[in-house]
Image (cartoon, rainbow, N blue to C red):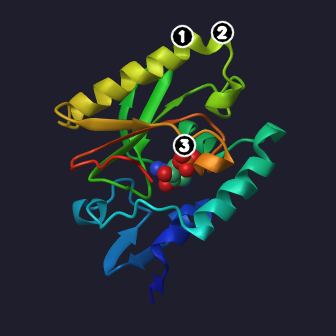
């Protein structure tokens, strides 16, 4: 029997969750598939961070500087599946497991090199930061959203960053609102 899981709890992912199907607001998400079915990428999206998200962000921040691998290392090493949209020597872009828009792609450096968050950036990171931004543009073109898309980078617990491997969110396919939550 499939489990009923509140949408916000999906942020508390684990590799275990990736292997099991869940029902989310009537939508069957089988994370063992590398590509989410399209209807599941068009859920109603919440702009407000929940208490769960803030708590998870604080917990993630507590171990951010431990140097331990993150879930993104497992994705880079293909130890867990992801839906890859774009890849080159330095950058990997894949669909977010908990999409906040019809198009929601994460763009990450393949080598973290101390970039757990933007707040940790140094002058030597300038080149890879530019490459990430350009990769976001490539993703937007591939996804057909060049007419309007948003790039988000959450840095630190107050911004609800939950994975401490710097990443850009590329969001689009719906009208974006301003100000963001
Ligand atoms: P942050 O909250 O740190 O800015 O963003 C982290 C993002 O990573 C979240 O949007 C979350 O949904 C996504 N994410 C976390 N774990 C996984 C995973 O295992 N696979 C994929 N594709 N996305 C993930």
Badge 2, how many Cα within 10 Å: few under 14, some, many 20+? few
Contact between marks 1 and 3 (CB within 8 A): the answer is no
Q: Is mark 1 within 8 Å of ligand 1?
A: no
Local secondary structure at mark 2: helix
Question: Residue at (42%, 35%) from the top-left corner?
Answer: 93
Q: Is residue 170 placed above or below 9 in the rendered structure?
A: above
Q: Residue at x 65, y 34 (%)?
A: 117
Residue 49, position in %: x, y?
Answer: 52, 61
Quadrant location of the C terminus? bottom left
Could you give the CA–CA distance between mark 3 and mark 2, rounded to whole angstroms? 25 Å
Q: Which mark is residue 127?
A: 1
What residue is shown at x 30% (from left), y 25% (from top)? 138
Residue 53 badge: none
Real-space Cα separation, disc 1 to disc 3, in angstroms: 23 Å
Q: Secondary structure at mark 3?
A: helix
**CB of mark 3 near ligand 1 (< 8 Å):** yes
Among numbered discs 3 and 2, the one appearing first in the sequence: 3
> Which of the two marks, 1 or 3, is nearer to us in this view?
1
Tell which of 161 and 2 is nearer to you: 161
Q: Secondary structure at mark 1?
A: helix
Circles 2 and 1: CB distance less than 8 Å? yes
First in sequence, mark 1 or 3: give its number.
Answer: 3
Q: Looking at the picture, how far across and down is residue 101, in whole percent?
A: 31, 53
Frontmost residue, 156 versus 17 = 156
Q: Quadrant of residue 66?
A: top right
Q: Residue furthest front?
A: 179
**Residue 15 drawn at (x, y percent):** 60, 60
Q: Residues within 10 Å of mark 1 (few under 14, many from 20)?
A: few
Q: Which mark is residue 75?
A: 3
Which residue is denoted by mark 2 in the rendering? 124
Indicate the position of residue 97 as horizontal and vertical percent values.
44, 56
Q: Is residue 89 visible?
A: no
């Amino acid at each position: 029997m499939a489990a009923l899981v509140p949408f916000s709890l999906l942020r508390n992912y684990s590799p275990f969750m990736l292997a099991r199907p869940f029902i989310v607001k009537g939508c069957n998400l089988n994370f063992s598939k590398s590509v989410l079915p399209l209807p599941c990428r068009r859920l109603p999206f919440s702009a407000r961070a929940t208490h769960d998200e803030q708590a998870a962000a604080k917990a993630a921040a507590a171990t951010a500087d431990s140097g331990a691998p993150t879930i993104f290392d497992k994705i880079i090493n293909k130890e867990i599946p992801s839906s890859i949209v774009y890849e080159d020597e330095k950058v990997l872009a894949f669909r977010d497991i908990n999409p906040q828009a019809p198009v929601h792609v994460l763009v990450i450096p393949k080598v973290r090199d101390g970039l757990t968050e933007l707040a940790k950036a140094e002058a030597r990171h300038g080149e890879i930061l530019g490459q990430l931004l350009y990769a976001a543009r490539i993703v937007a073109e591939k996804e057909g959203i060049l007419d309007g898309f948003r790039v988000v980078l959450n840095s630190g617990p107050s911004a609800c960053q939950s994975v401490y491997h710097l990443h850009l969110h590329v969001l689009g396919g719906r009208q974006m609102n301003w100000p963001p939550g």
